[in-house]
Structures are given as structure tokens and as C-alpha cells.
Amino acid sequence: PKVKEMSAEVVDSNPYSRLMALQRMGIVKDYQRIREKTIAVVGIGGVGSVAAEMLTRCGIGRLLLYDYDKVELANMNRLFFRPKQAGMTKTEAAAQTLRGINPDVAIESFTMNITTLQGFDAFKASISDGDGTSRVDLVLSCVDNYEARMTINQVCLEMEQTWMESGVSEDAVSGHIQVVIPGETACFACVPPLVVASGIDERTLKREGVCAASLPTTMGIIAGLLVQNTLKYLLNFGQVTRYLGYSSLTDFFPTMDIKPNPGCSNRLCPKLQAAFQRRYNSEEAVAARS
Ligand code: ATP
Ligand code: ZN
């Protein structure tokens, strides 16, 4: 689709003028570039749906949406979906609402499970262009399980694609976001979560009939942190935070850098780490000579 011009002059009815003000005020150099960006959002639940809405309202160029689930009335304690949409697939319901909010965004929906063999290939193909390089600028992981995160990790390592992971705790009062740059930062397999490290099967933790807690507040905050970091990454302003935690009980926001693990269980990861190190060392050498 043709890229629509955003004008800074029309202030009254054009929603883009408030976004273009970021440029006038010197925060962002060229806000228009957002129209050329493509984001894949995997998992259109409590965090992913809100993240997709924020990106839509920011005027992102293209959104790829992935989920296999349907909207349920039990989801109404979260933001975004409406009771009328119960029974629709989350991807279909989200595409409907997002197109209504901003028809300039190109939306592609993929109703599928990314962890099956077929799903893995379809997911990888969907973010690849003709020559096998990635056609997305960033992948946002908004899924709620380890298996799906490991799938995203694998596809992104194979594609050398930067992605951002997000999560909300089962007790709904804390969460985090994490940037994964293949070879440069820890990948999702470099530092296995405690549950996995201790060898407990995740499925045995999810007891039948016992549901995890969830709050629209925590999910909305995590979506906001995720998309804010996405905007900084895409439009080159401020500092992209590699890991940002949120603990609502004490209002604690820890940040850290997680170094890649040379002994990572993923076979591809250490190779990408070595390649990154070679690039880094040669850049250092060039800088030292000049
Ligand atoms: P709950 O489990 O608490 O009822 P939920 O399943 O909607 O809620 P959320 O944390 O709100 O969970 O959202 C996570 C989303 O990620 C869900 O919509 C889920 O369908 C999606 N998801 C999880 N795993 C996969 C997968 N392998 N492929 C595609 N989508 C997935
Ligand atoms: Zn790794």
C-alpha cells in the first residue's frame, strides 16, 4: 500500500499531527519512518492485543498477528477484546478492531500454533521475504508459555532477527520485557528460567481447573513498556533497555544486561556469538587505527 504522508501542519483532525509533534520537539528525528516498519506480534492475548493496538495508533506500517486461540468471555478482565467478539479467533477479532482504528496499517493475520512442525515452518516463512532474509523489523513475543518462546527464539536465531520477549507472572503482580539480539545478547535458551533449570515439566505446574491470576493493569503496563522500547528501537531515540522488570508490589523496575552464554544449549547461538565477537573486534581495530 501507498505510504500516506503525515503532515505536521494540520493540527485539528489529523491524528498523526500529535505524533509528528515528537519530531518538532526534538525527541524523534524522522517519525515518518514508522510507516516503513513491519512488526510481528506473536500471541494476541492480554499483552499482545494491547501492544498491537498501541502500534496501530502510532501509525506502524504493517502488523503480522499470530494466535491459535479464540476470544472467550473469560478474557474480559483484560483490555482490548469485547464480549461481542467471543467465539471469533483472536487474530480475526483483532484485525477487525485494528482496521477500524487505523485503516492505514496493513494487517496480516496468521491463525496458527507456531510450535507444531508445520507451524514452525509457516511462522518462519511468514517473516521471510523472497530471498530468505527477514521482512520484519522486530518480533514481539507476547505468548504465555515456554515452548512458544523457545520456538520464537529458534526462528529468530535462524533468521538473525532481533526480538523482544515479554512476560507477566502467574500471580499477575510483576512482569518483564527483554531484548534478544542473536549473538549479541543472551538468547532465550542461554539463561533457562528456574522452572526449566530445575527440571520440572511446565505442564505439571498448570493444574487442571486452577487458573493463573491476571490483571488488565499489569498487562497494560507491560504492553506499554514493550511498545515504548519498540518505538525507541525503531525510531532511534533514547536508550533501548535490554531487560526491564516490573514489580508492582514495591514499584521496583530493575534493569540489566544479560550476557550471552558460550555454553548455550542452542547449537546456533554460540556460532552467532563468535560471529558477533569477530565483527565487534574488527570494528574496535578500525576505531583504534583512526
Ligand atoms: P489464560 O491462559 O490466562 O486464559 P490466554 O491464553 O489468553 O489467557 P495471555 O497471556 O493473555 O493468555 O496471552 C497469550 C496468548 O498467546 C494467547 O492468546 C495464546 O493463544 C497465545 N499463544 C500461546 N502459545 C501460542 C502458540 N504456540 N502459537 C500461537 N499463539 C500462542
Ligand atoms: Zn543462547
Image (cartoon, grey):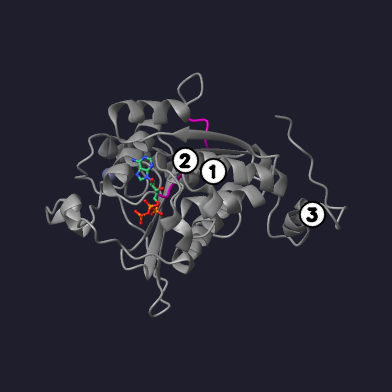
x%, y% of residue 122?
40, 26
How far apart are the two marked residues, 3 and 2, measured between alpha carbons? 34 Å
x%, y% of residue 163?
43, 45
Which residue is labeled 2 in the image? 89
Visible in this render: residue 73? Answer: yes
Residue at 15% over, 51% down:
201
Q: Nearer the viewer, residue 187 or 11?
A: 11
Which residue is labeled 1 in the image? 93
How far apart are the two marked residues, 3 and 1, measured between alpha carbons? 28 Å
Q: Earlier in the sequence, mark 3 or mark 1?
A: 3
Q: Is residue 269 left or right of residue 159?
A: left
Q: Earlier in the sequence, mark 3 or mark 2?
A: 3
Residue at 65% over, 42% down:
99
Q: Is residue 2 left or right of residue 243?
A: right
Q: Is residue 104 above or below residue 146?
A: above
Amino acid on which the number 1 mark rests in the picture: Ala
State whether label 2 is within 8 Å of ligand 1: no
How far apart are the two marked residues, 1 and 2, measured between alpha carbons? 6 Å
Q: Is residue 138 magenta?
A: yes
Query: In this picture, which residue range is highlighted in magenta?
Result: 134-142
State whether label 1 is within 8 Å of ligand 1: no
Q: Is residue 251 magenta?
A: no
For label 1, the crowd category at 10 Å Cα-Cα, with few meaning under 14, some 14 to 19 and many 20 or more, is many
Q: Is residue 115 left or right of residue 56?
A: left
Q: Determine contact: label 1, label 2, CB under 8 Å.
A: yes
Which residue is labeled 3 in the image? 17
For label 3, the crowd category at 10 Å Cα-Cα, with few meaning under 14, some 14 to 19 and many 20 or more, is some
Residue projecting furthest to the bottom: 250
Amino acid on which the number 2 mark rests in the picture: Thr
